[in-house]
Image (tube, rainbow, N blue to C red):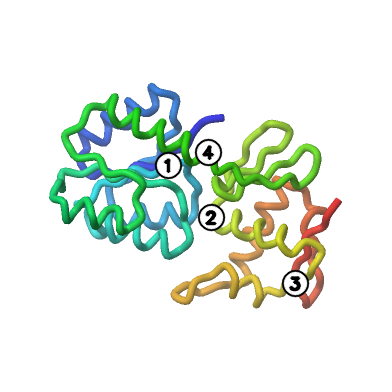
Amino acid sequence: MSIKIFLLEDDPTLNETLVDFLEDNGFNVDTVMDGYEAESMLYEKRYDLILLDVNTPNLDGFSLLKSIRSFGVTTPVIFITARDGIDDVEEGFNAGAEDYLKKPFALKELKIRIDAILKRYNKRGDKIELCNNIIFMPASGELIIDGVSHKLSNKESKLLELFVSKKGEVLSHEFIFNELWSYDETPSDSSLRTYIKNLRKILGKERIESIKKRGYRYIVK
């Protein structure tokens, strides 16, 4: 299955070079050049690895990582930056990074570091067998059905994890909101319905039952 990497790098030339290199090595890459845009994408989509520059428009890489970590995004992160002072390195690791690569760097070195982190990360391997042909990987936000991988968004993954932990129980909208939405987010029934709809598309409509005026229940087969 293809490894998905997210790249935040605001230098157009380096951005293009990195994307070409990563795709040539078999990775699937999404990239942006703006910190706010990166934040929005990382809240909604799941990746196997995140590469972050630090001095980026509107929101710097350090602040971005602190933001997504507080939101519950656990994807491993490598900083790629020209800020090479020891205080910068310390701040990067304190923000929640797994590695810190100083510019300029050799592309081969980046690949070595990526491979090492992915190998270490994948060994965490927490997987939940939902039934004979469906495996859920909460750490990576993947559903593997008959050997085919489906990537879930951050909220979808957390919602499914909640359902599985409370299987057979009716979960009210209020309970789900309290569990999955942070204090600075505004939950809505429409957004919850969208996440439920997306999960049903993958798992099947019968897996998540709507209980009128009460909430939702995950059906165990």
Q: Position of residue 117 (x, y in %)?
A: 41, 38
- Badge 3 marks a residue whose secondary structure is strand
Mark 1 vs 4: CB contact within 8 A = no
Q: Earlier in the sequence, mark 3 or mark 1?
A: 1
Residue 169 lies in what quarter of the image?
bottom right
Q: Secondary structure at mark 2?
A: helix
**CA neighbours of label 2 inside 10 A, class few (<14), some (14 to 19), many (20+):** many
User: Which image quadrant is residue 129 in?
Assistant: top right
- Place of residue 29 in the rendered image (x, y in percent of width and height, measured from the top left): 41, 35
Label 1 sits on residue: 49
Depth check, mark 2 against mark 4: the one in front is: 4
- Locate residue 137, reporting x and y percent: 62, 45
Lower sequence index among marks 3 and 2: 2
Residue 8 visible: no
Viewer-proximal residue, 12 or 182?
Answer: 182
The numbered mark, 3 or 4, whose residue comes first in the sequence reads 4
Three-letter code, disc 4: Asn
- Kindly identify the amino acid type of the residue bearing the numbered disc 2: Asn
Disc 4 secondary structure class: helix
Q: Residue at x 39, y 27 (%)?
A: 23
